Amino acid sequence: MSEGILVQSARELSDAIHRRQISCRDVMTATLGRIAALNGDHVAIVSLRPADTLLAEADECDRELKSGRSRGWMHGFPQAPKDLTNAAGIPTSMGSPIFRDLVPASDSIIVERIRAAGAILIGKTNTPEFGLGSHSYNTVFGTTKNAWDKARSGGGSSGGAAVALALQMLPVADGSDMMGSLRNPAGWNNVFGLRPSFGRVPGGPSPEIFLQQLATNGPMGRTVADVAMLLSTLAGFDAREPLTLREDASVFAAPLMRDHKGVRIGWLGDFGGYLAMEPGILETSEAALCHFGDLGCSVEGATIDFPMPRLWDAWLTLRGAIVAAGLGGLYAKEGTRALLKPEAIWEIEQGMHLSAAQVWAASTARTDWYHAVMAALERWDFLVLPTAQLWPFDASLTWPREIAGRTMDTYHRWMEVVVPATMAGLPALGAPAGFGKNGLPAGIQIIGKTDLAVLQLGHAYDIASGFARARPPAICS
């Protein structure tokens, strides 16, 4: 019974709950059983609330359905927001010992929306300290291990969310993405993660609402249809975040099927050898491109007329400025500075010495990059490249120091492949690309002009490839 509950897609689960074919208590019982069995090895869910409390809340959801009331499509869904976003009554540690005991009194905007859609919050999903780095380890909860190999990294910073999805601890999950944090862990765990257009999903409420334009919240799921459905809940304008888009989010709940014959796919690969790639990554990703051909798309190598080192330099400046502004107060105090990981200190120190002119120049470079990408999207309808430059690495490492013999000169240089979509501010879907000879998952990014178009292509690719239907050994044994 529990296996049948957990294997369903989120849309299927919602339908079964509302038809009262399964109870919310059954769903919660199965979820807690799965977490008890696997979370000790994988550390995906943190700050788990008491089982008796969660079962009582599930019973209340069942009583409401019996009386004819549904809270929304997520009625009775177990959900665990990423541990960077506030959920009233549940700790928001941000992976930092400084905030280990911080329990917010109110929800973030996306958590408000998840609750309003009917979800039951069971805890949080693990993340690296302050979301810095694409490897979800911290001194508060430990290291999130890959769903396919518990000796390997689960990625990040939405690593807990991706692993929880892959191991069927959650039907869908929220995450956030500044530098691939929805895309890299999706690729490494054989699920989907959408970095939406900037402004599609609100952040905050935040102390600063105008300058921070690199990171965004977004949805994750085991199918693209589920990702789109969760986006319909997370997206939409909120006056507390005035840069959010005002378009109707219900479009993402509609069927995603469309004809892709004649659609032009541009394969960026490693940008002509600019990016270091571990053996097997490009080959596995390129093999997945055939499924676009099955849809009637044309696929060819693509280039973008822009100097990539300039893009990386602009990225370092803008990211450093944002991190220093956000965490500089912790660095200024000796007691809290001592509790910051070295990578956070390095990032803050990089940002502290920047001038306004340097930040402006970086934003100008970003603007030029956007125009270059949009010019490329006149020739190709979508651009595709890998989600990561290497396979999931040893979970005991803090970050990989080299790829294919090339030294990585910063703690995040190994994830440079995700910077192009972030700096363009365009939607990018992290999608499964199959498995290497080592049995580990790889992923691709699908970049397009609009969220809906990216989701529609991703949905067709999902069905054609079948990659996401594979299940990790831990839940197949």
Image (cartoon, helix red, strand yellow):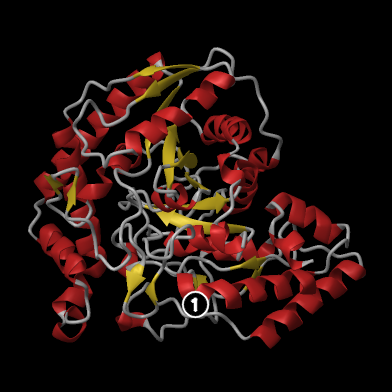
Q: Residues within 10 Å of mark 1 (few under 14, many from 20)?
A: few
Residue 187 % position (x, y) = 44, 47
Q: Which residue is mark 1?
A: 40
Instruction: Tell me: 209 left or right of 233.
Output: left
Which is nearer the eye, 394 or 415?
394
Q: Name the amino acid type tagged 1.
A: Gly
Classify the position of the C terminus by image quarter.
bottom right
Instruction: Tell me: 465 left or right of 33.
Output: left
Q: Residue at x 73, y 81 (%)?
A: 55
Q: Is residue 449 visible?
A: no
Residue 177 % position (x, y) = 39, 52
Q: Which of the 4 quarters of the picture holds residue 338? A: bottom left
Q: Which of the 4 quarters of the picture holds residue 79? A: bottom right
Instruction: Tell me: 151 left or right of 234.
Output: left
Q: Is residue 318 above or below residue 330?
A: above
Residue 173 % position (x, y) = 56, 58
Q: Is residue 369 visible?
A: yes
Q: Residue at x 20, y 29 (%)?
A: 273
How many numbered dots are placed on residues in this image?
Answer: 1
Which is nearer the eye, 290 or 119?
290
Q: Is residue 258 above or below residue 73?
A: above
Classify the position of the N terminus by image quarter.
bottom right
Which is nearer the eye, 43 or 449?
43
Q: Is residue 358 above or below residue 298?
A: below
Q: Which of the 4 quarters of the picture holds residue 459? A: top right
Which is nearer the eye, 294 or 55?
294
Q: Is residue 411 above or below residue 25?
A: above
Q: Residue at x 34, y 44 (%)?
A: 388
Give the structural element (helix, strand or loop) at label 1.
helix
Residue 463 % position (x, y) = 63, 34
Q: Residue furthest right?
A: 67
